[in-house]
Amino acid sequence: MPDSDIAIDVQNVTRAFVLRRRTGWMRRERSVLHAVSDLSFTVRAGEMVGYLGPNGAGKSTTIKMLVGILTPSGGRLRVAGLDPSRQRLRLARRIGVVFGQRSALWYDLPLRDSFELVRRIYRIPSERYRRNLDEFVDLLDLGPFIDTPVRQLSLGQRMRGTITAAFLPNPEVVYLDEPTIGLDVVSKAAVRSFLERTNREQGTTILLTTHDMGDVEQLCRRVMVIDHGRLGFDGELAALRARIGGVRTLRVDLAVPMPAMAVEGAEVVRVEGTRQWLQFPADTSAAPLVSEVAARYPLVDLTVGEPAIEDIVARLYTTDRLPAPRVG
Amino acid sequence: MVISDLASPVAAPARPFGAGAVGCARMWCAVAAAAARRLLCYRATVAASILSSIILIVLRGHVALAVWAERPDLAGYDSTAAITFTVIGQSLVTTFAVFGGMIDMPWRIRNGSIEVDLVRPVGFQRWWLGLEVGRAAVYFASRAVPAAVVGAFLFDLRRPASAGACAAFGVSLGLALLVSFGLRYLVGLSAFWMTDARGVQAVSALVMMFFSGAVLPLALFPGPLGTIAGLAPFGAVVQVPMDLYLGTADGGALRALAFQAVWAALLLLAARALTTAGLRRLVVQGG
Amino acid sequence: MNQRTAERTGGRAGQRVGERVGLLRTEAGSYLLLVGAAFRSAAQYRVSLVLYTLVEMAGAALDLATISIIFAHLSDLDGFSLAEVAFLYGTSALAFALAEAMAGPLDQLGWHIKEGRMDAVLIRPVSVLVQCATMDFSPQRLSRIVQPVAVLAVSVAALDVDWTPARVALLPAMIACGTLISISLAVGIAAVLFVAPDSSLAVSAVRQGSALATQYPLTVYGRRAALLMTVVLPIAFVNWQPALFVLDRPDPFGLPAFTRFLSLPVAVVCAAAAATAWRSGIRHYRGVGG
């Protein structure tokens, strides 16, 4: 892989925190928390990667190290060829960050003013700025509230504004930390389609931390799962699904109401009139099952459902089920 | 990767230095302007601040008049000079935030918003100075001037000693801002090392207030207290500008301005060093 | 009206008074409970407790230092000696410090309203006033009374006054009334925050201004201002008027002799006015919907 093609390069990165707790009147207890242990991955330019993990897994710590707000205790980090902790200001020009809970917008000023300031700070040529702004206003539907003070905006509007601000300078790499949390449906959809389109058209590398599986399903082909500071999975979403398993659902519509079907390799979990739901192991093919049902029962229609992402990831988080680190 | 946009930063050539400097200055002005605009949003706060200044002006003004009535030439000021000193000095207090604060760095560090500041491609100290200039400009126009005008109505004030004094006063205001910024910025930086910087803030606020000359002209301070007051940087914030206005600067206008400039330089250099150290500590240790 | 009706009416009125007293007692109980909790939580941070106490004392020292510096150059201010001014300072600072410790947290009311915390407050079964006063209670503020007590003691010893029983009795009375007036001032002004949460600065400015003004003899401010501080914003009754009696001085503005003893009635009136203002403030907040 040519070096210029790699946006994010993480090698054996560790980060430990020393915690001091007061036990009793005078004594102090010292413990070491390994937020991130031996983390390694590479992200090519233009990829959109989902970064999953339970709370406290080390996602935010990773992002902070990639941005340069935190230095690693060990290992090597390079973003766009630069060392974030040593070349923070230089790198800051080329990246964008969206913190889910914290906004980079000026609280009391209209949204537009914050964008103007971004233009000045990142020294975006006015032609490109105008073009970008028009496009983003259109994509994220900012028009109705772009002149409203930020403090009067809803969470969804604020997030759309924050994302715009992060993307205005056409950064090479963007980190998004829980961008859709607490958003209304409309905003969520707008944000997702914006990210998908920007990634596709601009080639922006995007690392997306999220708990929302809808985000992952719609946007990320590749996911990394981190837990207790270790990377548990790094590969395609489909592969993750396949590996962890779970169950798939076959929804069958029959011609007449019937008692629960008896089919080999599947179990009926629900019956409602002419409709029945069967569950079968996710790693087996649905084909033989479908043929059997079609052969033995008056079949009108059927649908095959994928296992719920929540289910998959929850299984992944259970420590004893954590598969060995692997690149898919 | 497909470079679909030829104007993207990946394809952009390196900027020539000149354009970079202009861009930097314009960015800086934009930051100050944004800070200024943000403050103007709250009209009630402005009114309240003016009221506060006026109350203090009236109270301290009358006390000053009573004191100078007993001792007409105390500390080299006559009664009118003393009252002018008190009124205008007091009206400048909010502009220079002599009571401390106005730099919410410790608060941002505590709640993590500092991360947003660190992601910006702007120098840390430069950013805060930009905000400060914007704030001071707004406070000067919206609080200092109205309060001084009201003070001029209530008391008999003196005009600047001469055109030269007026000019020196103007310059000294700028220098006073730098000194005041340096002091408060340094105090704010303590939050990088201390989990709770409020004690330091409170103590420094008292010291700054008392030794700036806003409460009493420093010339009144007896003995060793007076010596310390004369050498300390705090006096550069209110005492020096007022002395230049009245033409009563010890040793002449240039000496007074030099005093301010030297302290401003020292404080800003110290601030730079501590900023680097503080940021390094933050990124190595974590929040 | 026969005796039975009279008894019933008297009984009902008495019942209402009894209710009010009971209510006050519950409120006082809640207040002490919450204050105790604040003390305990402050005790967790031993280092900061000591530090802040020192800071508060240093803050009080600032005003005293100003007076000391003035008297380094003068022998008397407007005809008042150092001991007399120190007496005025001590009584004022003590009353305002006590009030500050109890009602000072009301400063934060504007902030709480803007952050949307008032709704949670209104739901709880404790009076809004008690909650606001205890939410940001800091035990360190109590340290502010140490210095004025010391100054007061020293000035009393230094004063050349004929200590009649009346004068001696008036001392604690004037402190108590002064504190009540100061608390009423704090509560009454804080009520404005329900209507205009942004004016926190104005609220604390009026309080600090009152505290500062009464540290000096009111003759310093001229006749008009002094009368304003007697009739409109009666801070003159915090320490100035009773002090005139203690110091055995004629009223420089020619007010009748009995005004010196009006501190208690003035305090009661102020308390009632403050309570009304506070209640209207809450009503306004509820009506507007926050």
Image (cartoon, grey):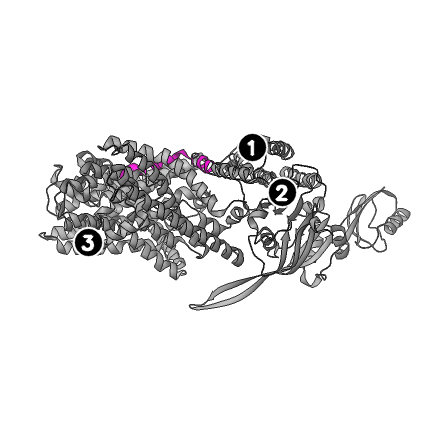
Q: Which mark is residue A146?
A: 1
Question: Which quarter of the figure is the N terminus of chain C placed in?
Answer: top left
Left or right, residue C169 beside residue B184: left
The magenta region covers: B32-57
Q: Which mark is in front, 3 or 2?
A: 2
**Chain letter, disc 3 residue:** C
- Residue A227 position in % (x across, y down): 65, 58
Q: Secondary structure at mark 3?
A: helix
Residue B51 colored magenta? yes
Chain-order first, disc 1 or disc 2:
1
Q: Quadrant of the C terminus of chain C?
A: top left
Residue C225 is labelled as: none
Q: Which residue is mark 2?
A: A171
Residue at the spot x=38%, y=61% of the render?
C47
Where disc 2 sits, the SS reads: loop
Q: Position of residue B134 (x, y in %)?
A: 43, 38
Task: Please give the residue where the numbered disc 3 appears in the rendered image.
Answer: C152
| Residue B251 covered by magenta stretch | no
Residue B69 spot, x, y in % from top left: 15, 40
SS at circle 1: loop
> Would residue C4 be visible to someone looking at this image?
no
| The one of B252 and A269 positioned closer to us in this rendering | B252
- Per the model, the C-alpha gap separating discs 1 and 2 is 22 Å
Question: Could you tell me which chain the residue with mark 1 belongs to?
Answer: A
Q: CA distance from mark 1 to mark 3?
A: 60 Å
> Quick one: label 3, few (<14), some, or many (20+) residues within 10 Å?
many
Residue at horizontal 35 percent and vertical 35 percent from the top: B143
Please name the amino acid that badge 2 sits on.
Pro
Viewer-nearest of discs 1 and 3: 1
